[in-house]
Image (cartoon, rainbow, N blue to C red):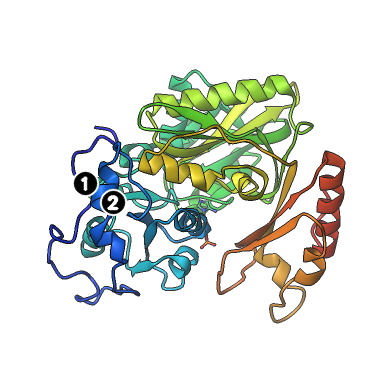
Amino acid sequence: MSAHERSEGPLRASSAPSEPGPAGSGSGLSSPTLAPSATTDDGEAASAGGAILPGATLGVLGGGQLGRMFVQAAQSMGYFTVVLDPDAASPAGLVSHHHIHADYLDPQALAQLAQQCAAITTEFENVPAPALRQLAARRPVAPGAAVVAIAQDRAREKAHFVACGVPCAPHAVVETAAQLEAVPGALLPGILKTARLGYDGKGQIRVATRVELAAAWAGLGGVPCVLEKMLPLKMECSVIVARGADGAMVHFPVQRNLHRDGILAVTEVHEENVPQALCESAIIATKKIADGLRYVGVMCVEFFVLQDDTLVVNEMAPRPHNSGHYTIDACDLSQFDLQLRALTGLPLVAPRQHSPAIMLNLLGDLWFGSGEPVPPPWPDVLALPGARLHLYGKERPRPARKMGHLSITAATVAQVRATAREAARLLGLDAF
Ligand code: AIR
């Protein structure tokens, strides 16, 4: 049954079970009062045309910046929100109407989330799939647990790419000492990546020789890994699609991405960033990958463009993506707006980019010149026309931690580039 075809509607005041919520049982609900329409209007709202309409309450499993920007998009359309995250000061929990402060697998907390929300999404592929499965027994959940479980495991993810006929980097699964021994020499030099729980370059080690490979696997604790052959890259790009329960799909323009130390640093989106033929191939491949999963929600697929201009898929993210943050300021619908529409069954209209855009990631490193953390020179940066600052409300800057991003838009590609370079200079970021 699809996310929007489920017969169980959102709870209404009269039908809401009277079981005590985790707030009453000590699991840390930070805001125990329900939003009025969470218990009164959303049942009727959801029944209109099958869509879950504004006024309903939506849940997010995970409280990071991606959840925060979803919450902000949902609130701007009049939805109420509940975030479940173990961190009492999570970026999304801080801006949500309600924050259930508990472990992702806490059964009482999950029951409370299901009770309060008409539908639930997720923002972090490290959220355990069984939590999504438990929620899906009571409420529409998008993306679904089965799909998230595939994206959480690099070996299964690659098998899906192969099944879709989309080329990916030559690779080998390393789960046992025997598999380590049997790795073909042609995969070296390569990158050893943990199969699970890696993001933003975490759990990845470059290896040139078999000796380094063995040491890296031991260093990663001997957990299941995938060794990928290092490829001669010309550039990296990504495509974000939104797919509805009825199979309707829309996409954003192809993003060109620059990574530093395994973390996204710069995204550029304008007509001069990626050759047209490559854009078309990347969009077709992304749609195949999403269709093959019968995906519901926003998905990002990252690609490598090799020196010979061939396109190779890298990985997929079952959620909005850092390379799509520019859509908030440069498009008529953002990736979070489309996540909301896919979740609630509202129309997926093709988004239109109205300005060339460059996004600069703001990592915690920017706070550390010497000694105590000092904020970057925001007033200087904000004096630049077309610059919009997005900070995620994270309490503690840490090197390599995503603290925010700067979106730059302008009327022309030359202008957006000039402004972005000036912003990078002011922030002390490497030139690009
Ligand atoms: N995220 C998810 N996958 C990759 C990234 N960057 C976002 C999610 C998650 C947050 O990063 O929003 O919740 C975790 O950030 P941090 O700084 O707490 O590690």
- Give the percent coordinates (x, y) of residue 87: 42, 69
* Residue beneath disc 2: 118
Type of residue at label 2? Ala
Q: What crowding class fits label 2: few (fewer than 14 Cα within 10 Å), some (14-19), or many (20 or more)?
A: many
Q: What crowding class fits label 1: few (fewer than 14 Cα within 10 Å), some (14-19), or many (20 or more)?
A: many
Assess mark 1: CB under 8 A from ligand 1? Answer: no
- Give the percent coordinates (x, y) of residue 35: 32, 66
Question: Does residue 322 sit above or below 255 in this rendering?
Answer: below
Find the distance from the CA under tag 1 to the CA under tag 2. Answer: 7 Å
Which of disc 2 and disc 1 is earlier in sequence? 1
Type of residue at label 1? Gly
In front: 214, or 413? 413
- Give the percent coordinates (x, y) of residue 301: 55, 35
* Residue drawn at point x = 49 percent, y = 38 percent: 299
Kindly tell me whether residue 144 is visible in this rendering: yes
Q: Which mark is residue 9?
A: 1
Residue 143, quarter of picture: top left
Q: Is residue 356 left or right of residue 50?
A: right
Question: Does residue 53 sit above or below 244 in this rendering?
Answer: below
Residue 18, quarter of picture: bottom left
* Residue drawn at point x = 54 percent, y = 23 percent: 285
For the residues bearing labels 1 and 2, Cβ distance under 8 angstroms: yes
